Amino acid sequence: MRRIALCLAFFAVAAAPALRAQAEPMQQAAPPVCLPSITLDELTKALDDAVSGPGDKDRTCLRQLLLPEARLSPIVHQQDGSFAPRMLTVDDWINAVAKRGSAPMYEVQVKVKAESYGHFAHLWSTYEIRSSLDGKPTFIGINSVQAIFDGTRWHVLSVLWEPNSTAGPIPEKYLP
């Protein structure tokens, strides 16, 4: 009997770490550090950072930057030859971009004109899309961003954009 008790005690001591590991929740990776958006200049940098990187990256910072009801709308060429915005929710955009997997894409605002009144602002910006931060642009276009200041920081309400592939060359006044 004593031998059985010793075997059970030995088993309990040997199995305790494995059982404890199963009972404890797995530690999650630390959330990403999001850039601040206290000023409109910071908002522009934070937006570039939130949309850039691998397609499947953690989008916590994008969700913090955009209002939950925000719309992201590229102008697209329709089958009938017309042009119209494709209205995306934040989740729609994240899911579409995630299909790229780990392939990176970097958006860089190269010229921004901001106008504000009270607690809202409009940013008109020329952007470049690159496959690496120091690479040549593969696309260039214009963003129209509406933002709201909540008294602490700026949040994005909507982004409407069109690349030069559908709109034609970027006018000189919008180039850096």
Image (tube, helix red, strand yellow):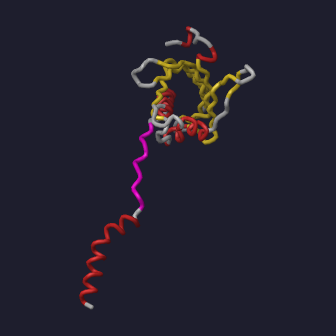
Q: Which residue lies furthest to the top in this view?
A: 172
Query: Which secondary structure type mostly characterizes the magenta part of the structure?
Result: loop
Q: How many marks?
A: 0
Q: In this view, does 86 lie to the left or right of 171?
A: right
Residue placed most toward the observer, 9 or 43: 9
Residue 29 part of the magenta segment: yes
Q: Which residue is drawn at 73% across and 20% down?
A: 82
Residue 103 part of the magenta segment: no
Q: Residue furthest bottom?
A: 1
Figure check: 63 above or below 22: above
Residue 33: x %, y % from top left: 42, 41
Residue 40: x %, y % from top left: 51, 28
Residue placed most toward the observer, 83 or 63: 83
Where residue 69 sits, quadrant-wise, is: top right
Quadrant where the N terminus is found in the figure: bottom left
Q: Which residue is drawn at 75% across and 22% down?
A: 80
Q: Is residue 49 left or right of residue 10?
A: right
Residue 99: x %, y % from top left: 54, 37
Instruction: Please provide the residue range marked out in magenta.
Output: 25-34
